[in-house]
Image (cartoon, helix red, strand yellow):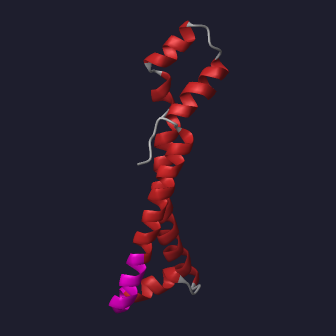
Amino acid sequence: VFVEEIGRDHIRTARAFGAGAGAILWKYVLKNSLIPIITRVMFSIPSIVIAGSLLIESYFGIPGVGKLAFDAVTTGDQPVLKAVVGATALLFVLVLIANDLLYRAVDPRVALR
């Protein structure tokens, strides 16, 4: 993301006007490249939480939501699977809301309506 942002026109213009490398990286490159970085990090949180707990709890035999989901899949327990999928969907929606709020915090051009 940084390499793509460094090649843009406004960065070349800032260099032409004599801005220092540190100022360019901090003020223009980092600020404009945080939106895709935040998106990628926030979208990986639900999968890390659910898949990570499933993997760790089933491997080590720790009782928890991951092991419960694994046992529900192997035994075909539909109500438990519906609850786990519902909790995952709720977590995903909360992450999307946090993602939008972080967009607004990072870039004031983003409007929340």
Q: Is residue 53 above or below residue 12?
A: below
Q: Is residue 48 above or below residue 83?
A: above
Q: Residue at x 48, y 60 (%)?
A: 95
Q: Relative to 52, is 83 on the left or the right?
A: left
Q: Residue at x 52, y 68 (%)?
A: 49
Q: Main secondary structure of the magenta part?
A: helix
The segment highlighted magenta reads 73-86
Q: Is residue 45 magenta?
A: no
Where in the figure is residue 69, as x and y percent of width and height?
44, 83
Q: Nearer the viewer, residue 65 or 57?
A: 65
Q: Is residue 4 visible?
A: yes
Image quadrant in which you'd find residue 75: bottom left
Image quadrant in which you'd find residue 21: top right
Where in the figure is residue 17, as x and y percent of width and height?
57, 7
Q: Residue at x 44, y 42 (%)?
A: 111
Q: Nearer the viewer, residue 103 or 88?
A: 103
Q: Is residue 84 magenta?
A: yes
Q: Residue at x 50, y 23 (%)?
A: 6
Q: Nearer the viewer, residue 93 or 37?
A: 93
Q: Nearer the viewer, residue 99 or 46?
A: 99
